[in-house]
Amino acid sequence: MSPEIVQAVIFYFLAAMLVVSCAIVVFSHSIVNACFALLFTLLAVAGFYALLGADFLAVTQVVVYVGGILVLLLFGILLTSPLPIVLGVATRRTYYLAVAAGAAVFAMLMIIVRAFWAGQPAVPEQQSTLEALGMLLLGKYLFPFEFASLTLLAALIGAAYLVRRNDR
Amino acid sequence: MNEFLIYSLITIAKIGVVFGLVIGSVPVVVLAERKLLGWMQVRPGPNRVGPWGLLQTLVDAAKVFFKENIIPDGVEPLTYRLAPILVITPVLISASVIPFGPPVTIAGREITLAIADFDLSLLFFFAVATLSVYGIVLAGWSSNNKWSLMGGLRSSAQMFSYEITLSLSIVGILLTSGTFRLTAIAAQQAGGFWHWNMFLQPLGFVLFLLAAIAEVNRTPFDLPEAESELTGGFHTEYSGMRFVMFYMSEYSSVFVMSSVIATLFLGGYNPPFPYTFGTSWFDGAIGLFWLLAKIGALVFFFIWLRGTLPRLRYDELMMLGWKILLPLAFLNLIVTAILVALNWPGWVLGLTGVAALIVTDLVVSQILWRRRRAAG
């Protein structure tokens, strides 16, 4: 038994989890089941990040997408619809469009990987990315970082203003 | 035997020990709660099975294995069955980052007394601990029962609101200690109780404690399972082992949350007097003893709160979370950041926190008193 074999086993486990849960997200007729399957999709992606040595990204993926956004999605669905939540069946045309869009994204990713990261090793040496990320975010990329957070804050205030009742 | 195999075996052994500790704590905490609540309410509590009723929870656990597992008509079968597992798994996983003692050397090999010890262990804890809300929401939804659904929805709204405070209140500690690694945070607090983060971050400690109680759904924040309003909340339709899983996850999350509070604010495995840990197994046991003592004190505090305070109303819960705790957490973060940047000594930080707590208490009680007087 060696670390490589264990890594391979984990990789294939995550890959299977990702593919199966993605299929459920796409093909399920119950929106809650789709949401629920999306949980496992996002967890599998976090697992891939961790496997590739991007520890901070992996944990942030879980905190933001799984712990925040998906709970909001579920909350919205449960709060707005009555219990037997069934989605309409997709038409043939949406299927074709979806397949085309998926193929386009796949092609784009392949081009990026082949063109820009051709010579680099798949897994960088294992070290924590926390310090380097912090230095970059609050040093070199301080302005984009702060700009993004200000934009998000403005969006938040705007949303809070929009949902306010006007009966006063 | 190669190095990797030995490492794997040690990790598996550690997983076994921590799993046993967390699950084994459940009957102890349940019994302690029943006995202490009995004592606080001037009644005997369980006193029939074994000496002083000490075997009561063991007998209850044995009984539960033979209970019928009912799946009501009209539930979503798959999610209904998965939900209890989804509630208890994150609790057990999040226990993996807690340092139960100082590093020890056994047979010439240094062993960390935490299953996983990596740079982001604190963030990992918060990431995983929030996952149990899925189990609760899905249990509430798949039960096809309006009370269950309302319990699930309350739970998710409460989790959102208090998670922000929970995460923000520890940023102060991150600033003063300069690390995300739980073992390092615990090790930094060695050398007597005056080195504990509780005195460096009094405001952060109180905020974290309150938000933690809300996160583990304990009274006075147990609205998701308010029995007088929701007939049990999200687990109304559950019975047998599935119900017990919810029950176990609730009590083991009390244990895990207490151990994290102890590690972050109460010195972790360090005794309250100056003591230099060696690397023998005995020193590891001393560390474990002190951590368990602190967890015991925190669990007692949780039970004490349950025996003292009534449940909050829903709007009160939201007001407390968003209008009082969250701004205070931001205030704590800003003040700590300024004082750390100016490099002022730790006692200034501690005194500022205590002053902020006193001012908040005065202001809030003043507002509540005025409101009550205005209402007549």
Image (cartoon, rainbow, N blue to C red):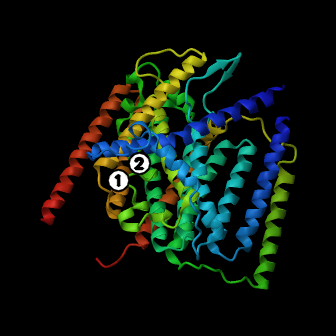
Chain letter belonging to callout 2: B
Q: Position of residue A40 (x, y in %)?
A: 68, 59
Q: Position of residue A145 (x, y in %)?
A: 57, 50
User: Would residue B38 be found to the left or right of residue B132 on screen?
Assistant: left
Q: Label 1 near label 2: C-beta < 8 Å?
A: yes
Which image quarter is the C terminus of chain B in? bottom left
Using the image, determine if residue A119 lies above or below residue A115: above
Circle 2: is it few (<14), some (14-19), or many (20+) Cα within 10 Å?
many
In this rendering, does residue B170 appear at all? no
Amino acid at pointer 1: Pro
Q: Residue at the spot x=71%, y=15% of the render?
A: B108
Q: What element carries label 1?
A: loop
Which residue is denoted by mark 2 in the rendering?
B213
User: Would residue B179 be found to the left or right of residue B158 on screen?
Assistant: right
Q: How far apart are marks 2 and 1 (CA)?
A: 8 Å
Q: Residue at the spot x=45%, y=38% of the render?
A: B261
Amino acid at pointer 2: Ile
Report which quarter residue B33 is drawn in: top left
Which residue is denoted by mark 1 in the rendering?
B220
Q: How many labels does the image show?
A: 2
